[in-house]
Structure formats: structure tokens, C-alpha cells
Image: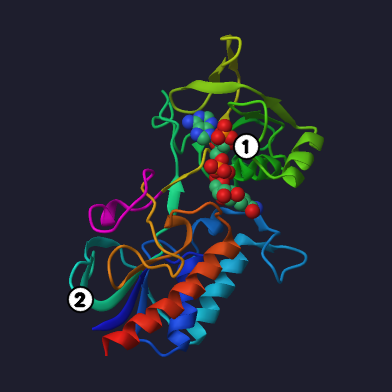
Amino acid sequence: MYDLIIIGGGPAGLTAGLYTARARLKVVLLEMLAPGGQVLTTDWVENYPGFPDGVSGFELMDKMKTQAEKFGLTIKNEEVTRLDLSGENKVVTTNKGTIETKAVLLTCGATWKKLGIDGEALLAGKGVSYCATCDGPFYTDQKVAVIGGGDTAVEEALFLTRFASHIYVVHRRDQLRAIKLLQERAMAAEKIEFLWDTVPLKIIGNDGVEGIELKNVKTGEIVQRDVQGVFIFIGTQPNTDIVKGQVDLDENGFIITNHHMETSLAGVFAAGDVRAKLFRQIATAVGEGAAASYSIERYLENLE
Ligand code: NAP
């Protein structure tokens, strides 16, 4: 019987792992991929405090993992397939077996949203990508399109200027959602061309991306652009299928908590990008992981 099972090894999960292992709880963190979460797909992080020159997403997450393990956190590479959360003891089933715990912390994060247009699924991994850091170098001296106008789209478009010859940033409005600093950098980048008020209709190609069909939502004009890659960054959706019907979710499927990171079920907590909230930053995920740890310790003390 564990005190705590943490599900998901991004910044929130690893921080909670560090705090609770250091507090000598019997805790295990389950992660189906490599610990690090979505930050692993970020080339360079320059707004996480303590790194005045910036740090690579990989290095930052590797340091968080090492620090948590130093205090005794066990990290297991297992996929959670079923959760029974309603009883006082929670039952967690993974691809490797069943474990019981007094408390569960859901830090299962979010995954990239899909556009749902023709060609997207067919060409995924063959020119359609959701990770510029992973796939950018494949597009050296080629033309690519980036879809979206948020921090991720603009940051990744800037990253792609290292490789691609030309980058169309396709945004459905005439103003970016990204912070001003990123906007300024992108506007100054010679290789970046903004296509405002424009939505993608279709990604063209059979064995690889050959082009993209776009529609101007103001004029109705439909045009085609020759590109070899399409990078889609239109936000994220929460990884909450496994808890649907067990804890309260908002209309977009994110887990509702109070400011102690408590969900609607006693003994079940949530932190990081999977939570219903306004800001999704590494720093906020870390803060929530720490806050959840204190709530969990208090919850366990009251059980005794
Ligand atoms: P986001 O902020 O939700 O932005 C999504 C973008 O995609 C928006 O510009 C949106 O357009 C557009 N979009 C959404 N659905 C679309 C559709 N179906 N078709 C076309 N365009 C669509 O997502 P994000 O950029 O991934 O950022 C997620 C969170 O992570 C944010 O809180 C962000 O601040 C944070 N983040 C921070 C950093 C950093 O601090 N360095 C880096 C990356 C992400 P509209 O603008 O019209 O809604």
C-alpha cells in the first residue's frame, strides 16, 4: 500500500515527487513515456527562474528528475489503464499490474490538439508534425507552414528559422495570442511570413506533404501554398479520459480543483496542465506540484 501514486512525470509530477519523497511518504511516480512531459519537446526555456541564460527543455527536466530521485522518488515506466478512485483506498491498474494507494495525484498533462482536416492524420509523421524540436532538422532549406498564433506556434516558428528556408505562420485572426516579446522576434524574422485571417482546409500529399490549402476567412479566397512540412500548434487537450465520470471536469475536459489542488473526490488531487486554469507555464506547474504535496501530506495525516 502506497501513501501516494503520482500519475505523470512532467514538471508538476516531478516536483510533487521531490517534495513527497523528501517528506518520507511512500510514493511512486508512474510515467508511460520518458519523465519530463511536454517540456521535453521544447528546445529552449528562457522564462524558468534560476537560468539567466536559458536552459534546454531536456536539461531542465533531467535536472528535476535527478533531484527528485536523489530524495528517494521511485519512477516506474508504466501506463495506467484503469483507476478506481471512489473508495478510501484507491486502486491503480497499469500495464504491469495493480497497486493500491491512500492518495492519488493526477499530473497527466495534456496532448496537442488536432485540426481534424483532410490529410492531417494520413500525413502525420510524414510531414505533419506537432514537435518542431523533434522534426525541425528534417526541413532544412524547405518551406513549412506553422498553424496557430499562441506562444507555442510563434516560439516553434522561430525555432524553425534555423532550418527551413521559409515559414508561413497561418493564424485565424489578425492578431497573435503570443506574448509581445515573441511577436516582436517573429515580426523581425526574415524567414517568417504571416498569413492573417487564414485557416487551413486541407493538407496535400500522399507519401509526404506537398502543400496546404488555405482559406482567408474575411475574403473567402482559397489559395494553395507549396510546403514540405506542416507544424500544428493550436493548443492542447487534457489527458483525462481515464478519470471521466470519476472527478469533476470543466467543459473542455480539464480537472476542476480548489486552490489546495483537491479534486471533487477525497484523496484525489490534480496539478499542472491537466488542471482547469488560465495559465500553463512550467513555473505554475511546479508551484502546483509543491502545493499539492502539502495538501496530500495534510490529507494523509488526517486519515491516521
Ligand atoms: P493557446 O495559447 O491555446 O493558443 C492556440 C492558438 O491556436 C491560438 O492562437 C488559437 O487561435 C489557435 N487555434 C486554436 N484552435 C484552432 C483551430 N481549430 N484552427 C486554427 N487555429 C486554432 O496554445 P499554446 O500556444 O499551445 O499555449 C498553451 C499554453 O502554454 C498557454 O498558456 C501558453 O502561454 C503556454 N506556453 C508558454 C510558453 C512560454 O512561456 N515560453 C511557451 C509555449 C506555451 P486564437 O488566438 O484565435 O484563439
Quadrant hosting residue 216: top right
Q: Secondary structure at mark 2?
A: loop
Local crowd at mark 1 within 10 Å, few (<14), some, or many (≥20)? some
Residue pictured at 45% horizontal, 80% vertical: 294
Which callout, 2 or 1, points at the residue further toward the start of the chain? Answer: 2
Report the mark closest to the observer, 2 or 1.
2
Residue 134 included in the magenta stretch of the image: no
Residue 242 included in the magenta stretch of the image: yes
Picture coordinates of residue 266, whole percent (x, y):
28, 71
Give the dominant element type of the magenta stretch: helix, strand or loop. Answer: loop
* Cα separation between marks 2 and 1: 52 Å
Judged left or right of residue 255, residue 179 is: right
- In-front residue for pair 84/191: 84
Looking at the rendering, in which quadrant would you find the N terminus?
A: bottom left
Picture coordinates of residue 284, whole percent (x, y):
56, 63
Is the residue indicated by label 1 positioned so its CB lies within 8 Å of ligand 1?
no
Looking at the rendering, in which quadrant would you find the C terminus?
A: bottom left
**Amino acid, disc 2:** Glu
Establish if 59 lies above or below 100: above
Quadrant hosting residue 3: bottom left
Local crowd at mark 2 within 10 Å, few (<14), some, or many (≥20)? few
Q: Which mark is residue 139?
A: 1
Q: Which residues are magenta?
A: 238-252
Q: Which residue is mark 2?
A: 88
Picture coordinates of residue 190, whole percent (x, y):
80, 32
